[in-house]
Structures are given as C-alpha cells and as structure tokens.
Image (cartoon, rainbow, N blue to C red):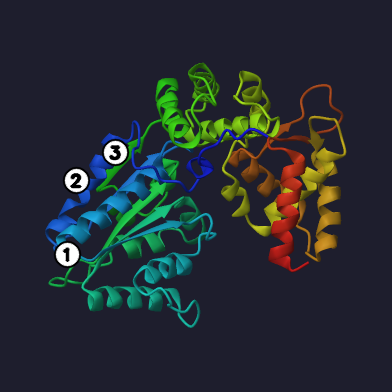
Amino acid sequence: MGRLFRDESVFDIEYVPERLPHRGKQLEELMNVFAPIVEQPGRIARRVLVIGDIGTGKTVTTKRFGQLIEEEARKRGVRVFYAHVNCQRLRGSFFHVLLTAMRRLRPGFPDRGYAPHELFMSLMNALDEEDAHIIITLDDAEALIKKDGSGPLYDLSRAHEDQLEGRRRLSLICVVRDRKKIDALNEATKSTLMEYVICMPKYTEDQLFDILADRVRLGFYEEAIREDVVRFVARLSAERGDARFAIELLWRAGKLAESEGKREVMPEHVRKALMRVWPIPRDVVIGLPTQAKLILLALAREFQMTDEPYLRMGELKDTYRAICEEFGVRPLRHTQIWKYVRELADRGVISAEPSGPGTRGRTTFIGLRVPAEELRKMMEEELSKELGV
C-alpha cells in the first residue's frame, strides 16, 4: 500500500504550527497587549476577549501566543506561565479551570480537598511564592458562563481589585464564539473583559488554500496531492470559512486515497471524504452532558436501522427511554428532552424542524448531521466510561 503522508500529526486538532497564515495580525496584537507583562513584571495585568466562529483560528492563535510569550519571558529571566483551558471539555467546572492553572505551577497539586475559592487563593499565593505571572486562556468560555454565570469571570478578571500595592500576577484571555454570551454577563464583568477585543473573521477561499498548502508541505510527500485538488478542498470549505473543517477534509481525503493504495489524492477522494467530515469538532460532542449523549445514542441507533432522512420526536423518545433503561438512568420528561434537542440543533449536531402542512398532528422532524455508525460507537464508549456499564 502506498504511503502518502509524511507526518499525519500536522492534521491533528491539537497541532500548533509555527506559522499562522492570515492570523499574524491577531497574534501580533496579543503580543503587543501582553508585552508589559514581561517588560514590567508585576506592574500590570491584562484582560482580552477573543471572538470568532468555529474554525477561525481562535484556539491555535492563542496557543501559539502562549508558546511565544513564555519563550520571550524566559529570554528576559521573567517567570510567566501560560495555561490554556478548554472549558467545554471540563464541562464548565470553575474548580477544574483553577486546577489546570495551578498545575502549571505545581504539577502534582491534588485534585480534591479544596473549594473553588480556596483553590483560587492557593493559586494567587503560589504565584507570589514563585514571583510569577500566569496568563489563563478560557477557551469555549461559554461553557463556564452557562454553568456559573458571571461569577468565575468576575473573580479572574478582578483578581487584584483588593490590592493597592501588590504585584499583578494573573491575566485573562476569554475566547468565545458569540458576543451575545458576553453581553449577558453583569456590567462589572463585561466592562473588564471588554478592555481589549480581538475579532477572528471567517477565512476566505484563498486564505483556506494558504493554510492547507502549509499543511500539505509539512504533512504529505511530494506529488501526493496536486495544487488544484488542494484548491478544490478550499473551495468546498469556503462557505463555512472553517479551517478545522478544511484540514480534516484534506486529511480524510488523503486517508481514503492511501487505503485504496493510490499514489495520489484525487478529487473523487475529496468528494467521498466530504460525506465523513463532522460539521463540529468531536471534542464538543465528547464534552456534552450525559443526557445529551443518551439522546444522541438513541438517534444514532435509530438512523442505523432506517433509510429515512428524518425521525419524529415520538420515535426518538421511545428509543431514548429504552437506552436509559439499558444504562440504568432515569429518563427525562418531554420538555427536558426537547430542551436538549434544541441545544444539539444549535450546536449543529442535528437538525430539528417542526412538521409542516400535510403532516398529521404536530411533531418535530429530527435529522442527523454526522455519520450514525461513528456517532453510535463514540456514544456507547463514552457512556460506558461515564456510567460504568
């Protein structure tokens, strides 16, 4: 079988390239805003809000910034730590946000025995003891806001409010997809977070092509994929403006060509791969609440047994209740199920549309936007781990 990939790791969602095509301006903005942290240690703290849709480079840009600011601090002999926290993966837990930050300073710090406010004080004390500064990035901060409202962001953004003479030790970057989530915060928190705002627009076709060309150079062997095929991937991804989607589409096309023993990725491999790319990152699905996963498992199993493009709400509820019994979980009532269905639709995992004329009775038609078999396997594995079944 022919090998097309030189290095598959460059297509991984966690990969942070040295060069960020079309995000140099935003990266430079971050470096300029935080420059006083390393130039005048302890004199100032910063709060920055980063806004942009899925796949617009928010995560990779802030992670690359974290690498660069730590490197600059080391050159100057200043102790600066960067902690990148995915709030969605931590299910909006403020305690685990603080624990992640604390473990940047004290790697073996215990994960129990502290209330959030105690852990927060321990973090601030540790920063004083280490004579250090920490920059905490709250990625997918919507999850933290949804769970605890303004409280955690208020505490983090105003960590030094009671200190008139003390050194500034903690800075904050808040990363969100929707500015409306910030508008819903209390005025005190919102005004502090709006100190600096950096926007990430969707990528254009040409910009996506540049990003993909970099990954091709790093990840594929020479002559494994033509330039016009890379352009084809960029064009198919341009409507979304989503680099994550484009990179995964490119990778999946390569894997299909490789599995067929081909020496080159062709447009047909891209077309086939398009049917397998998820419209949202898998880690978003993995980070969903248990009940949402049970509903997704019900949908996945139903869609594997039918050729119909949509399910009625009643069909979903019947299968969902059976799955709850299987996993020993108390099922939700109709209004709670409906709430989760709407949230899953808002996230883009499913579609949910009310029935129109010609349908007997009122119901909701639900469609699945990810492969049913792959979703079923993922949800069964995740629920087995969570519920010990």
Point out which mark residue 32 bears.
Answer: 2
Is 333 located above or below residue 355 in the figure? Answer: below
**Residue 11 image offset from top left, x and y in percent:** 51, 40
- In the rendered image, the quadrant that contains the C terminus is bottom right
Query: Does residue 171 appear left or right of residue 283 in this picture?
Result: left
Residue placed at 50% from the left, 41% from the top? 7
**What amino acid is found at the position of numbered circle 3 in the picture?**
Gln
Q: Nearer the viewer, mark 3 or mark 1?
A: 1
Q: Nearer the viewer, residue 11 or 145?
A: 11
Q: Is residue 384 above or below residue 316?
A: below
Q: Which mark is residue 267?
A: none
For the residues labelled 3 and 2, the Cα–Cα distance comes to: 10 Å
**Residue 49's x, y, as percent?**
33, 47
In the image as oriented, which residue stretches furthest toward the top?
A: 228
Question: Which residue position is annotated with label 1?
Answer: 77
- State the SS at label 1: loop
Mark 3 packing: few (<14 Cα in 10 Å), some, or many (20+)? many
Quadrant in the rendering for residue 264: top right
